[in-house]
């Protein structure tokens, strides 16, 4: 894939891996994938109220809007009560059409990326022990605690083996307090499921963990890295060198309780 030459190319790189990764989560957790004319919808019935796992990606807004009824029917049939469409903030017509169709703007995480050679790694903190271990159930458990989800709601991550995935954990005084996962696709490394327990926040743990994961990716020969950042995580990613390429809006449709 190489290094994009302009902002549109960076945004395409950030978006490019998401359908594949979410599709694997759907398949691996006993769900399904709907593909329709440049559209991919991950259907994860094991997390029926978590729209982030039941995500829709598209290439052309007009085709997405034309397929909304079919997508909604597929989620309804699977018993999924909340699903979302990822829309770059510049695609205002698509966002407006989704709003007219009953979707609500639920979140605006930031699309971020950088060249791995530009990583700004902090000095190692001897109080923070970092280990690489592919333990996806532990990744899921830490994310559930960090983000206030019920046990089992991150089951799609816990249950799905994904090739070229690397998981990292950070410990303080022997207690595991944070995690991060890198997924390599092509020569890009996508950073996902970064989570720090509340009692360990503000201590530089996420920065140390993220920098270690990205340094290892660089050692493997990876060229770029991408992620979609929550409001909580964005300052950490700024400090290690990621650039912001705008909001990725999440337009959610949720069935009334």
Image (tube, rainbow, N blue to C red):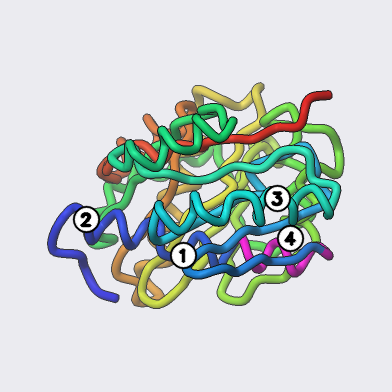
Q: Residue at x 40, y 77 (%)?
A: 186
Going from N to C along the chain, the mark reached first, 4 or 1, is 1
Q: What residue is shown with label 3?
A: 139
Q: Residue at x 72, y 40 (%)?
A: 142
Considering the image in quadrants, where does the N terminus appear?
bottom left
Spatial CA span between label 3 and label 2: 32 Å
Spatial CA span between label 4 and label 3: 6 Å
Q: What residue is shown with label 4?
A: 135
Spatial CA span between label 4 and label 2: 35 Å
Secondary element type, mark 3: helix
- Magenta: predominant secondary structure element? helix
Q: Nearer the viewer, mark 4 or mark 1?
A: 1
Secondary element type, mark 4: loop
Q: Which residues are magenta?
A: 22-30
Residue closer to the observer: 39 or 65: 65
Q: Which mark is residue 17?
A: 1
Spatial CA span between label 3 and label 1: 20 Å
Q: Give x and y (percent) for residue 128.
A: 55, 40
Going from N to C along the chain, the mark reached first, 3 or 1, is 1
Q: What residue is shown with label 2?
A: 8
Q: Residue at x 31, y 64 (%)?
A: 224
Q: Residues within 10 Å of mark 3 (few under 14, many from 20)?
A: many
Q: Residues within 10 Å of mark 1 (few under 14, many from 20)?
A: some
Q: Which mark is residue 99?
A: none
């Amino acid at each position: 894939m190489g290094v994009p030459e302009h902002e549109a190319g960076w945004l395409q790189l950030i978006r490019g891996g998401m359908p594949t990764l979410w599709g694997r989560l759907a398949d691996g957790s006993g769900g399904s994938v709907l593909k329709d004319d440049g559209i991919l919808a991950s259907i994860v019935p094991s997390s029926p109220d978590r729209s982030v796992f039941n995500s829709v990606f598209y290439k052309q807004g007009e085709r997405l809007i034309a397929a909304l009824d079919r997508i909604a029917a597929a989620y309804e049939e699977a018993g999924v009560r909340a699903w979302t469409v990822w829309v770059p903030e510049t695609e205002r017509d698509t966002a407006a059409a989704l709003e007219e169709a009953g979707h609500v703007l639920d979140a605006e995480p930031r699309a971020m990326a950088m060249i791995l050679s530009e990583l700004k790694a902090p000095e190692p903190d001897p109080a923070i022990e970092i280990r690489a271990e592919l333990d996806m159930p532990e990744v899921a458990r830490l994310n559930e605690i960090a983000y206030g989800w019920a046990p089992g709601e991150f089951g799609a991550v816990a249950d799905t083996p994904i090739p070229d995935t690397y998981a990292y954990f950070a410990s303080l005084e022997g207690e595991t307090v944070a995690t991060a996962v890198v997924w390599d696709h092509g020569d890009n490394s996508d950073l996902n499921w970064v989570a720090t327990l509340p009692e360990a926040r503000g201590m530089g743990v996420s920065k140390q963990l993220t920098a270690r994961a990205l340094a290892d990716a660089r050692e493997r020969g990876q060229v770029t890295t991408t992620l979609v950042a929550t409001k909580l995580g964005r300052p950490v990613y700024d400090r290690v060198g990621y650039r912001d390429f705008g909001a990725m809006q999440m337009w959610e449709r949720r069935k009334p309780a």
